[in-house]
Image (cartoon, grey):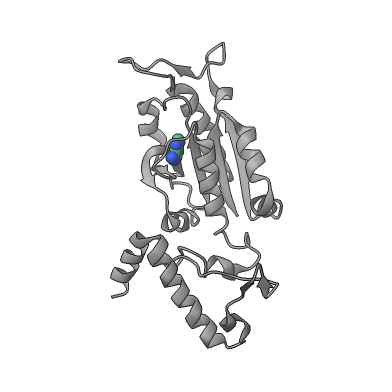
Amino acid sequence: MMHFYIMTLFPEMVLNGLHTSIIGRAEEKGYISIEAFNIRDYTLDKHKKVDDYPYGGGAGMLMQAQPVYDCWQTIDAKIKEQRTYDNTKKTRVVYVTPQGEVFHQQKAIELSKEEDLIFLCGHYEGIDERVLEEIVTDYISIGDYVLTGGELPAMVLIDAIARLVPGVLSNHESAQTESHSNGLLEYPQYSRPELWHEKRVPEVLLSGHHANIEKWRAEQSIKRTKERRPDLFEAYEKANK
Ligand code: ADE
């Protein structure tokens, strides 16, 4: 059982998104749990304010340290209470930010081995650096573009990580042979009918000859990776020399 905790100003956005489909089913079946904590609930400000102007000037507002820190403390204490294993281990806190390391499948695999994971979603122009220094262990970006908040990136990460938790995917095979798990993109796939819009399913796939099918798929994987992701192909060649 893997536990996800999300610190956010928009808990319903993350929960609605993650309660559907495969991740929702995994939660119902008890393979994972997902809890969202509203950072606003932890502000000591009497008007429930969580943001303020940046020192030194500049555009936009910053999320203040206090509500973020108090929210984290609540979650951290709760995890310590529930934990049945090594209680001295610090729970990883992932801050999703365009200033992080770009996310990839290897990182998803690494994080899927954790028992508890906390995600921090920023808003406005960012978060007071001092609280980040105290609580964040991993800075992760989902790509070189900027979104309005950290909720979508946190959902992307949780989806990619949760599907690697044993039991979440019904067919355990499917996490093994897919795109990126071997450094290559996946081969093209076909289903019924055999003829559609005058396009035929490649003959070899109808042959029942498993060795030939595997060989064809491996070739297609390489061809596709070369064409669409020359950067991945180069890394693959280097690693397999
Ligand atoms: N917040 C805003 N943009 C982001 C990105 N590209 N990755 C992670 N968090 C973000």
- Extreme-top residue of the structure: 46
Q: Nearer the viewer, residue 143 or 89?
A: 143
Residue 91 position, x and y percent, is: 46, 44
Point 57% across, 11% down: residue: 47
* Count of all numbered marks drawn on residues in the image: 0
Point 53% across, 20% down: residue: 43
Residue 156 relative to residue 225: left or right: right
Identify the image quadrant of the C terminus: bottom left
Can residue 80 be seen here? The reply is no
Q: Ligand 1 is located in which of the four quadrants?
A: top left
Identify the image quadrant of the N terminus: bottom right
Point 67% across, 75% down: residue: 194
Q: Nearer the viewer, residue 56 or 116?
A: 56
Residue 211 position, x and y percent, is: 52, 87
Point 61% across, 75% down: residue: 201
Q: Nearer the viewer, residue 74 or 16?
A: 16
Figure quadrant of residue 135: top left
Residue 8 relative to residue 191: left or right: left
Can residue 127 be seen here? The reply is yes
Residue 108 relative to residue 40: left or right: left
170, above or below 127, in the image: below
Residue 180 position, x and y percent, is: 45, 63
Residue 3 position, x and y percent, is: 57, 48
183, above or below 79, in the image: below
